[in-house]
Amino acid sequence: MIRSEILKEIAPIIRDHLVVCNIGLPSQELHMIDDQPTNFYMLGTMGLSSSIGFGLALAQDKPVISIDGDGSVLTNLGTLPTIANNATGNYTLLIIDNGSYGSTGDQPTYAGQKTSLTAVARACGCDNVIEVQDKDLGPVLQSAIDSDEMTIIVCKCDSGNIKLPVITMDPVVIKDRFMKAVAS
Amino acid sequence: MNIDKKIADDLVANDISFVTTVPCKQLAGVIEEVEKRDDIFHIPSNKEDEGMGLCAGAHMAGKRPAIIMQNTAIGVTINTLATLIQYYRMPLPMLISYRGELREPVACQVEMAVHTKALLAQLNIPTYHFHWQKDVEEFDNILKYTFMCNKPVAILTDANFWGGYGDQ
């Protein structure tokens, strides 16, 4: 499965939850598949989906899912120790690991070679790290959201992109409707 | 006057309850003071752009955040300031140790000091410079200003403000 197929499959699971979605194609795909006010789309700032979602989870009680990519996590690896050492049960980090920088032309990442993000997350002190194959993600994600324990999911999948338009929604509109959803 | 306590008091008085820090020798006292306060959730960051991401999340949760860091961080965070904090119109007080200014003992720190105000000006970030201890009296007003205008605001605090480096 490629990332857009995964997002299509998990859309019903994440629909009613706060989602912080990674820059570029992941946000564009989620926006096209199932736009929700509970989705915060990153229009820039590669690497910070995990940190933004984690800050959100620490500062309020609702479940938060950060959708990240292997390339973006590699950009901001330093956040994994921060997440591990300040764990909060309402946070799920979903790393869609297709071994490539999808939004920039599918250049290979080191996560698709010798580096295991699962092992990195564990070494950083994350207690509950699950590596899962794409087709098995749904139930794992659902139980992570339902659980009181913070979960890092590394979902291994194929690289590949679909053609779709950029998000033209104004960033302040994205933020405003998201904050209203957080507060509701 | 204990400026560490005054800064932490002003943070609490302005309902700032989420503070992330990247350490600096000059900031050690204020970081310790922030850590002590029950009204503030203090989370150390490994890098300043990560810290701004955490603050962005806390802001969207309805909390008032702040970041405490060195001026070298301006070089690290320009993209985050432009494409996250400014683009989405997020308030962010940045209490910054202004290394490389008067009474600085480490020459390399001057190399970023000479760019600091120019970079902040290029980003149209309101910038204040605390040089004398009495300058801290403006801190409360600066915090109110930050949350009034929903912008990142820089408070540069140099070695003279913190009382120098002693006998280093």
Image (tube, coloured by chain):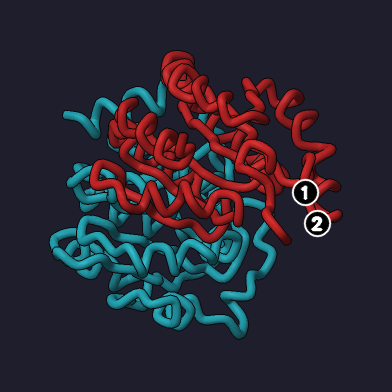
Characterize the local packing of mark 1: few (<14), some (14-19) or many (20 or more) Cα atoms within 10 angstroms: some
Give the camera-side residue of A147 and A89: A89
Residue type beneath disc 2 = Val
Vertical placement of residue B101 versus A84, above or below = above
Q: Which residue is mark 1?
A: B104
Tell how many labels: 2
Please name the residue shown 34% across and 38% down the image: A39
* Percent coordinates x, y for residue B127 in the rendering: 64, 24
Image x and y of residue B166, in percent:
67, 54
Q: What residue do we see at 31% from left, 27% from top?
A: B13
Real-space CA distance between mark 2 and mark 1, rounded to the nearest whole angstrom: 6 Å
Q: Colour of chain B?
A: red
Residue at 27% across / 44% down in the picture? A59
Name the one closer to the observer, A175 or A27.
A175
The answer, for residue A164, to whether it is visible in the render is yes
In the rendering, at what x and y percent does residue A94 appear?
A: 37, 62
User: Mark 2 and 1 residues: CB-CB less than 8 Å, in contact?
Assistant: yes
Question: Which quadrant of the figure contains the C terminus of chain A?
Answer: top left
Give the side of residue A184 with respect to residue A28, left or right. Answer: left
Q: Amino acid at mark 1?
A: Glu
Can the viewer see residue A41?
no
Q: Which chain is cyan?
A: A
Estimate the x, y position of residue B99 in percent, counting from the top left: 72, 46
Q: Is residue A26 left or right of residue B119?
A: left
Give the SS element for disc 1: loop
| Rendered position, A182 above or below A180 | below
Pointer 2: what residue? Answer: B106
Determine the image quadrant of residue A161.
Answer: bottom right
Q: Is residue A177 above or below residue A10?
A: above
